[in-house]
Image (tube, coloured by chain):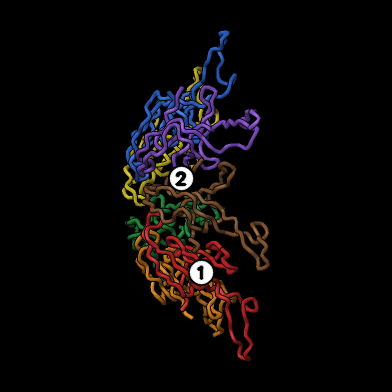
Chain colours: A brown, B purple, C blue, D yellow, E green, F orange, G red
Amino acid sequence: MKLKPLADRVVIKMVEAEEKTKSGIILTGSAKEKPEVAQVIEVGPGGMVDGKEVVMTVKPGDKVITSKYSGTEVKIDGEAYTIVRQSDILAIVE
Amino acid sequence: MKLKPLADRVVIKMVEAEEKTKSGIILTGSAKEKPEVAQVIEVGPGGMVDGKEVVMTVKPGDKVITSKYSGTEVKIDGEAYTIVRQSDILAIVE
Amino acid sequence: MKLKPLADRVVIKMVEAEEKTKSGIILTGSAKEKPEVAQVIEVGPGGMVDGKEVVMTVKPGDKVITSKYSGTEVKIDGEAYTIVRQSDILAIVE
Amino acid sequence: MKLKPLADRVVIKMVEAEEKTKSGIILTGSAKEKPEVAQVIEVGPGGMVDGKEVVMTVKPGDKVITSKYSGTEVKIDGEAYTIVRQSDILAIVE
Amino acid sequence: MKLKPLADRVVIKMVEAEEKTKSGIILTGSAKEKPEVAQVIEVGPGGMVDGKEVVMTVKPGDKVITSKYSGTEVKIDGEAYTIVRQSDILAIVE
Amino acid sequence: MKLKPLADRVVIKMVEAEEKTKSGIILTGSAKEKPEVAQVIEVGPGGMVDGKEVVMTVKPGDKVITSKYSGTEVKIDGEAYTIVRQSDILAIVE
Amino acid sequence: MKLKPLADRVVIKMVEAEEKTKSGIILTGSAKEKPEVAQVIEVGPGGMVDGKEVVMTVKPGDKVITSKYSGTEVKIDGEAYTIVRQSDILAIVE
């Protein structure tokens, strides 16, 4: 299954951070401070949304930071995604 | 009876998930994680809604994901439906 | 007395459902699941409402479903009616 | 004293219902179900209200039904009036 | 000191009602039902307010009725005034 | 340090009232009724604010009255200022 | 990692105030009154935001004062930043 977001919606997935310590041990997720970064998976077409023209400026693969608590969580094929409006995306992390 | 939604309203029906396990047993609804997918049954005509032009982009048969708690539940001929605005539909599942 | 709704208002009346069981007994209202259908009695003229052009698309006699709890109940000559905005009407039942 | 409502305001007065029973006894107000009808006393000039053009469609003498709890009650020369916006008037009773 | 209201603001002063009883005794303020009438003292220039053109229709000396609880009370040189928006003025009393 | 307000913001400072009694004693601030007047220190450039053109009509040195509780208090070099929107200024005191 | 804010977003960082006392002792942060000043780190492109044209008027390096409690705090590479809308910035400190 694949999610095709409508209008100004964007499908994102929280990034499971993975980091090698100097000693070579790999730390994932809960073992360290929760990362606040998500990856863009799918981007809606934009266009007229609530009577206002919206141009989509994020693209699949972008790492982004969103407003806390924004969006709707969904589970597709056992994977958890979040669907947000593009206006809930605060910044791209480069 | 048939529901003809007005304006930007869409009639959807929660999908009763059915899945065969490897052993051949069929699991429905409550026996597993509740699916969050609904099927579009009827689509309103769109047009001017609250002073803004709305173009309908979903069509009957589409599998969709909606905002949680959005819409009004109705029972017609013993069948439960939900009537939502198209803007409450987050994504189409393909 | 007769109600002439203003602007985008619509006067509706909850339908007292009546249904023959196979054995011929007639069931009304409280004896079965409450129907959620109302009948349109009078329709306002539409026009500019709160700065937006509203075209009326329902007509007297239509069976409709409205948002729960919307509208104002009034009693005229002992009959109970509800006055709603057309935008509170979700769908026409055919 | 006389009230001249501004903009889209309308001065109304609750109608003290009076009704003869078959035996000739006159019942007023509290002796029976409270009527929900008011009479239009004065009508504002309409025009631009909150940036939107409002045309007044009610006139003095009209019997009207308003949203419950809308408006401000005032007492002028011992008489109680209510001042509402025209958009709080749901229907004219004929 | 003198108050010059900005935009669509209006400075009003509650009228201290004074009334002669038939026996010639003068009743003021708290001795009888609180009057709900205020006098317009100063009127702002109107113009663009929150993106909308506002034309001032009240003038100093007008006796007016305002929405209850609207406005800000200020004390200038020991005198209490209330500053309201013109849209909080419901009617002129003539 | 100096504050340069953005958009329709205005930096004001509560006026520490000073008043000579007839006997020549000087009363300041807390010794008498709290004045509700502030002095304009800096004025933003105005222009498009939230999609609406705002023209600034107050200027540094004006004595003004603001809505109670509006604005953000800041302390710069030990001095307390309040930053408000021009629309929170109700009147100029002359 | 670097944050590229979207639309009218601005990335700011609270300024860790540092101040030499006359005796030459350096006081930082918690040792004195909390400064309310932040430094602009990155500025979004502006443009159409919620249907309104926004021109960015702050630039990286500006010292600014923001509405209390506005914005979202994020931690990137162990450093804490706040992402605000430009409209949450009240004034530039010079």
Residue found at the far front of this picture: A24
Q: Chain of mark 1?
A: G
Towards the viewer: A58 or B40 = A58
- Residue type highlighted by circle 1: Ile
- Residue type highlighted by circle 2: Pro
Q: Chain of mark 2?
A: A
Image location of residue F81, percent across then percent down:
51, 74
Residue F94: quarter of image: bottom left
Write the residue at 37% across / 47% down: A48
Residue A5, which numbered label? Answer: 2
Towards the viewer: B46 or A41 = A41
C15 versus F15 height, above or below: above
For label 1, the residue is G12
What secondary structure is found at the residue carrying circle 2?
Answer: strand
What secondary structure is found at the residue carrying circle 1?
Answer: strand
Q: Are marks 2 and 1 on the same chain?
A: no
Residue D59: quarter of image: top left
Image location of residue B83, percent across then percent down:
48, 34
A15 versus G33 height, above or below: above
| Disc 2 from disc 1: Cα separation | 31 Å
Is the Cβ of the residue at disc 2 closer than 8 Å to that at disc 1?
no
Foreground disc of the pair 2, 1: 2
Write the residue at 40% across / 71% down: F44
How many residues crowd around disc 1 within 10 Å: few (fewer than 14), some, or many (20 or more)? many
Write the residue at 63% across / 32% down: B21
Image location of residue D56, percent across then percent down:
33, 42
